[in-house]
Amino acid sequence: MREGPIKMVRRRKRRKLQKLTRLQGLEEGLRVKRSCPTCGPEPGGEEKDRGNTFSVQLLPPELVEHISSFLPIRDVVALGKTCRYFHHVCEAQGVWRRICLRLSPRLRQQGSGVRPWKRAAILNYTKGLYFQAFGGRRRCLSKSVAPLLAHGYRRFLPTKDHVFILDYTGTLFFLKNALVSSTLGQIQWKRACRYVVLCRGVKDFASDPRCDTVYRKYLYVLATREQLGMVGTTGSRTCDCVEVYLQSSGQRVFKMTFHYSMSFKQIVLVGQETQRALLLLTEEGKIYSLVVNETQLDQPRSYTVQLALRKMSRCLPHLRVACMASNQSSTLYITDQGGVYFEVHTPGVYRDLFGTLQAFDPLDQQMPLALSLPAKILFCSLGYNHFGLVDEFGRIFMQGNNRYGQLGTGDKMDRGEPTQVHYLQCPIALWCGLNHSLVLSQASDFTKELLGCGCGAGGRLPGWPKGSASFVKLHVKVPLCACSLCSTRECLYMLSSHDIEHQLTYRDLPTHRVMGTPKPSLRAEPPQDPGGSAWACEEYLRQIHSCPTLQDRMEKMKEIVGWLPLMASQKDFFWEALNMLQRAASGADPGPSDPES
């Protein structure tokens, strides 16, 4: 009776052993070489692997591309840098098309460019709007809701109650603040947690140019619309128009349509509510303006406004304006050649910006004033009474009122002409507010960091409540792909997006134009102190020596560490070490702690 069960057990063991033997043979047959498919096998390993190796190149290219499309975007980019074969595989549009449709299933247009599907996939992978509130208990970085229909993020604008985001297909999204229930069942107020599509076919949009979002009651949208033909004609024409929406509800209250022969690309606002001037920049670089009364926009009536050529384009018709920036009482123009021109409409702001009223004409406030600059300007930021410029070499120039140290020059002296901030170079974004400035930069280890200077009241400079007259590193965790920023009275916003077709690149500064480097002469002599580092160190020591107390010297040393061209980890190390020394000097040091903490 026992022979039957024994035979069954032996039979099961025999079948299991045969099954394992077949699996082991299959693994040896499918073993892949640990070498580049295009560079050949490893030296000395050809005889060892002969007969039981398998090359990736033997697989159909379509199969390899299909497998690669299931990898995360970061892994696809890393795999494409291993060898030439995988570089061609990971650059195939079929791979990026599958990745893009997986990230955005509703996307039907891949956009434009040399690599349209790769650009679309990376835009949707890196898109995000982050914000950090200045008040309240939780002062950490949060992320807004991400609209599924959005094709990347191009620009954003916070208003009094909500946030508006424009994507790369011309769709404007309305991100609403609302009361939501938390995981604990509590009702809390949350920013940008719901979204709706406001309108499509948008080119640009703007609101009240003041830094305080309380004044941003209306949203002006520059869009393209289909206009029905005249009586007796067939078909329709595409015309540009400006639509005005209430920021609180998203309701359209006003619309003005232009002739089909006029095509605009940018809109900015300037002036008071009763005399709001809309500046429109055409594709040809000309500027037109019209005036509306915001206090009458919500009244149900129609009237005609006059569109006139701005004096900047009438007096200087040979110049082609590339972009504009504005605040309540001034406008800044940048031409396609990198020149900068100013319009200042009030004497107080003119005195703050230029330090004098000598050239101000109250009867001709639209007369453009040219700024003298050493190089081509790429982009700018205009605050209430100060502004910043970034040239083609990555240098930052600041000008205007410096009462709170918002120019970042290390002092509180006003500047009536562009002054270079020598310790900052190659910024990603620059923002000037009411009395403080922010710079988004990239460290040498490719991490992003946020620097700020000026007034620190209300928490607008996180980590520096007393403010700073120099740009210091703020205690904010910056997203890896952050590209622009904006600050309001209540919150700090950062937009994350990476466009592979439009990347900001700076030129190398010629040797004879570097500060402290002499121009080349007939006698070949080595340059003395290139960059003026010795002079800068002497100036830092003089500032430390002028501080009356040890605590003041420690605070000054923290500011100087922020100025030095160090890596982010090195700056964090020096700041933490100075904090430990400062606590020990004041008697508040609890003693050595566990490194893990």
Image (cartoon, grey):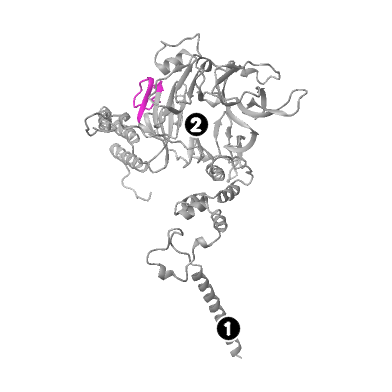
Lower sequence index among marks 2 and 1? 1
x%, y% of residue 586?
30, 36
x%, y% of residue 44?
37, 67
**Which residue is identified by label 2?**
486
Horizontal side, residue 573 vs residue 168: left or right: left
**Which residue is identified by label 1?**
11
Task: State the extent of the magenta-drawn residues as a range.
Answer: 399-422
Of helix, strand and loop, which one carries label 2? Answer: strand
- Compared with 33, 99 (above or below) is above
Judge whether residue 336 is colored magenta.
Answer: no
Of helix, strand and loop, which one carries label 1? Answer: helix
x%, y% of residue 344?
48, 16
Is residue 452 in sight in this rendering? yes
Spatial separation of the CA atoms under disc 2 and disc 1: 74 Å
- Compared with 596, 353 (above or below) is above
Instruction: Pick the quarter of the image with the N terminus.
Output: bottom right
